[in-house]
Image (cartoon, rainbow, N blue to C red):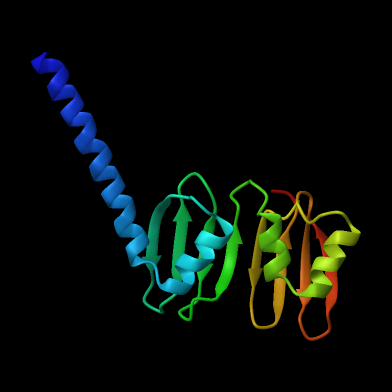
Amino acid sequence: MKRRTALLTTIFWTILLLGACNDSVWEQLPSSVSQFVTEYYPGSDIKSYNTDADGNQTVEIKNGAVLKFDRDGAWTEISGRGVPLPEVLVLDELPSPLYRYLQEITATTLVYKMSRTPREYTLLLTDSMLEYDIATEKVSYRESTL
């Protein structure tokens, strides 16, 4: 009986401590980053959150995506790490002409990674890479592999 009680107590405290550690990572996230993660990866556990010297932020979802944000909280790179990004994320976060292009080639569910700079968006698809010039709205295509 004592052995069973000790085992149950150990399990209880382990679960409690693991849950507390996860909550503390969530508490570190700035509100804009937290809202982004909650909207596009609801119910996910955060494995880690880091900020570099320039204020750039990285969020790693446990068994999931890695998201990078600039110091203002705007995403700069999202990698599904071998899993396609949520289609609603692709719809909401890409410029309309680029999203329409993805629709035309039936690739809205085939985006594995996307990044952006002030000048362009870059998308990694299953077998290709797309670059989208914001100023010209031109899409360039290159073969690629995951």
Horizontally, residue 78 falls left or right of residue 122, namely left
Q: Is residue 112 above or below residue 71?
A: above
Residue occupying image coordinates x 75% and y 54%: 125
The x, y position of residue 64, in whole percent, is 53, 48
Residue positioned most to the left? 2
Q: Report how many numbered discs are placed on residues in the image.
A: 0
Horizontally, residue 76 falls left or right of residue 4, namely right
The x, y position of residue 104, in whole percent, is 91, 61
The x, y position of residue 26, in whole percent, is 37, 60
Q: Answer with the quarter of the image where residue 137 lies.
A: bottom right
* 51 vs 17, nearest the viewer: 17
Q: Answer with the quarter of the image where residue 101 lies.
A: bottom right
* 43 vs 120, nearest the viewer: 43
Q: Is residue 139 above or below residue 106?
A: below
Horizontally, residue 18 falls left or right of residue 138, namely left
Residue occupying image coordinates x 23% and y 30%: 11
Q: Is residue 80 above or below residue 52?
A: above
Q: Is residue 28 visible?
A: yes
Horizontally, residue 58 falls left or right of residue 27, namely right
Residue positioned most to the bottom? 135
Q: Is residue 20 above or below residue 115?
A: above
Q: Answer with the quarter of the image where residue 100 lies.
A: bottom right
Residue occupying image coordinates x 28% and y 51%: 21
Residue positioned most to the top? 1
Q: Quadrant of the N terminus?
A: top left
Q: Is residue 67 visible?
A: no
